[in-house]
Image (spheres, coloured by chain):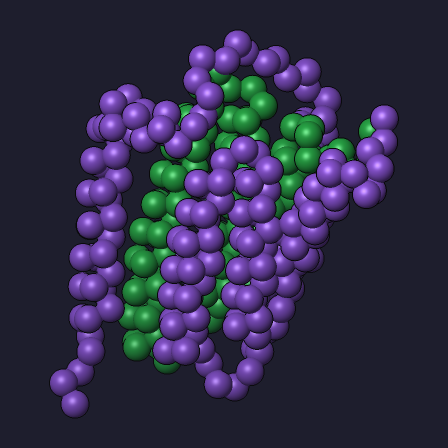
Chain colours: A green, B purple
Amino acid sequence: MSILALSGSLETYLVVGAFLFGIGVYGMVQRPSFIGMLICAELVLGGASVNFMAFNHFLAPDQAVGQIFTLFIMAIAAAETAIALSIIIAVYRNYKSIEAEDAVDLNG
Amino acid sequence: MTPSILSAEGLSGIVFLCFLAATVAGAFIAVGAQRLIRSVAGLALSFLGVAGLYYYLGSPFVALMQLLIYVGAVCVTIVFAIMLAENDDGPNPKRKAILKIAGLPASVVLIWALSALACRTDWVKLPQTGDGSLEGVGRALLTTFGMNFELISLVLLVAIVGSLVLARSGRSKS
């Protein structure tokens, strides 16, 4: 298959979704700060959304369902970002740091 | 069969490859950059590419929403939080070494396993019942998914109020 016809196959999108998911998981493990972990969690959610949209376009009977799922994921991600950032700012006020290893009083 | 580079299909394929490259490169920047602000820029680039992929998946509306919500709102909010909370003393690698050593092979195996699963499965296409137009999305959102729609608005309201409460408490009067 030609490289210029990649946009027409389901596997392309699934591989991109898997890549975003995997690199997001790696970043969540490896980033030292809470905001870095949040950024990588957004990547994981983006990978899931790409998978939903790909299945929706190529396989689903009703093509509205996947789009609605993706919109719901976006709403959840926005809520998650708001909550996580306010928690990070509260942690920063108490510890003067956003490094995960500094907040050890949480016994995590 | 290979479409010519100068035909409409070839040009569309090149644009698709650009979006693909933006997604992958943005994800690498978001994970690998030392400074958090560069990481957010990589995240924005990656989501710009993902919005392009959504466009190629036949849904310009979701692509627009991706740009509005992720690139427009989420990334800007994270930039604000970095302005408020980032340490000034530069990168400070304190993460446990075992996580860094074990994380890379684990995630590579994860990506490989998911990709192999996607490529080797014989996906079955079901008969179409809806065309996925914006009108269909709106109709399903207010009929089939009406309850979920209300619940998601409730979740957003609770999240906004909760984040206000969390960010406000502990702030001193001075």
In which quadrant of the rendered view does residue B97 lie?
bottom right
Query: What residue is at 32 percent from the left and 58 percent from the top?
Result: A82
List x then y, in percent, for residue A32: 53, 67
Q: Nearer the viewer, residue B169 or A55?
A: A55
List x then y, in percent, for residue A62: 44, 19
For this view, does B17 lie left or right of residue A37? Answer: right
User: Which residue extends farthest left?
Assistant: B173
Q: Is residue B58 above or below residue A22?
A: above
Q: Nearer the viewer, residue A30 or B38?
A: B38
Dividing the image into 4 quarters, which one contains the N terminus of chain A? top right
List x then y, in percent, for residue B83: 41, 78
For this view, does B152 lie left or right of residue A71? Answer: left
Query: What residue is at 18 percent from the left and 70 percent from the top?
Result: B169
| Residue B86 in view in this figure | yes
In which quadrant of the rendered view does residue A95 lie?
bottom left
List x then y, in percent, for residue B87: 46, 81
User: Which residue extends farthest front?
Assistant: B7
In which quadrant of the rendered view does residue A47 lie?
top right
Q: Is residue B90 above or below residue B140?
A: below
